[in-house]
Amino acid sequence: MPVQLTTALRVVGTSLFALAVLGGILAAYVTGYQFIHTEKHYLSFGLYGAILGLHLLIQSLFAFLEHRRMRRAGQALKLPSRRRGSVALCIAAYQEDPDYLRKCLRSAQRISFPDLKVVMVVDGNRQEDAYMLDIFHEVLGGTEQAGFFVWRSNFHEAGEGETETSLREGMDRVRDVVRASTFSCIMQKWGGKREVMYTAFKALGDSVDYIQVCDSDTVLDPACTIEMLRVLEEDPQVGGVGGDVQPPAKGMAVEDDQVQAAQVRATEAWSVHQRHVSREQ
């Protein structure tokens, strides 16, 4: 059946269903028919409530079926090799709860995307921040593909004892570690979240096609990267995609007001960054 005809039938069917529900609610309200009621009507259940309850049940059923269909389609999706772009996941970390950070890194390790690069930048390089590097080693550092660097500075502020030569060497070291490693962790001088993201974007440059970002308390679905990349690949007019952010399920460590996921074209982000640098220079 043609896609346009299928869409038209769904629109007509949905409209007829909505009209039927509204008509039933109006009729129930006018007639005031009740199935059950107590004396003085302290508790009653009528036709109006029955129609509303049935409507809610049907909506919930179809929402569940549609969500299950989308998840299955995402898990089964395989991008054509000729169009699959490279992706780097950038994790911004700042004095994170150890359990949250472990869950985040483990979920990143389970993402179903070939050759995914993971870059964690820690906003802080003091001794009290070192536990985050230890957790990185614990979860992701068990292979030769993992690299790290503790930097006294960041790209906009020199650390204590840095010279112009050592600062340049540190910048080069950050780029080398990030680009050469599948899993990398950079600890740098505190500068805020924007400084952390700047370091990740600057170090990656144009070495990847897409950049995915999240905080260190985010638990990522294994299909999240391929789902968002599918949207970007299908429509050249789309330059950024937000993830399907959901409140945490029972037992999850993350807070729903802290969870975030976003994805942008690295080429576009790089061009914006280049303009920013040229203005500073």
Image: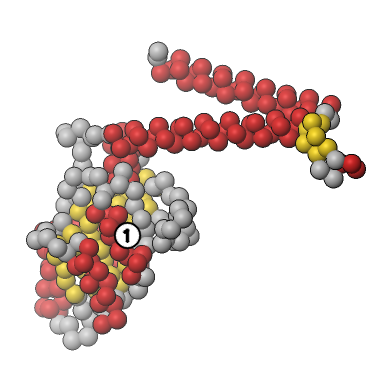
Residue 71 located left or right of residue 9: left
Measured from the top left, where is residue 212 in percent x and y? 30, 52
Quarter that holds the C terminus? bottom left
Residue shown at the point (23%, 45%) measured from the top left: 113
**Side of 144 relative to 71 (left or right):** left
Residue at 30% over, 47% down? 222
The spot of residue 254 in percent (x, y) is 42, 61
- From this view, report whether residue 280 is shown above or below residue 232: below
| Image quadrant where one finds the N terminus | top left
Q: Quadrant of residue 19?
A: top right
Does residue 198 lie above or below 245 as drawn?
Answer: below
Residue nearer the viewer, 204 or 254: 254
Residue appearing at x 25%, y 45% in the figure: 112
Mark 1 — residue? 104
Residue 261 position in % (x across, y down): 37, 53
Name of the residue lying farthest toward the bottom: 161
Question: Residue 153's image quarter?
Answer: bottom left
86 on left or right of 6: left
Q: Is residue 174 visible?
A: no
Task: Point out the residue furthest to the right here.
Answer: 40
The three-letter code of the residue at mark 1 reads: Cys
Q: Locate residue 147: give its quadrant.
A: bottom left
Label 1's element?
helix
Considering every residue shown, the one lying at the far left of the view is 144
Query: Residue 13 location, x and y as percent?
Result: 56, 19
Is residue 192 depicted above or below 61 in this figure? Answer: below
Q: Is residue 277 left or right of residue 192?
A: left
In this view, the residue in front, 168 or 186, is 186
Q: Residue at x 20, y 35 (%)?
A: 83
Q: Rate crowding at label 1 as few (under 14), some (14 to 19) or many (20 or more) other CA atoms within 10 Å.
A: many
Residue 153 visible, this angle: yes
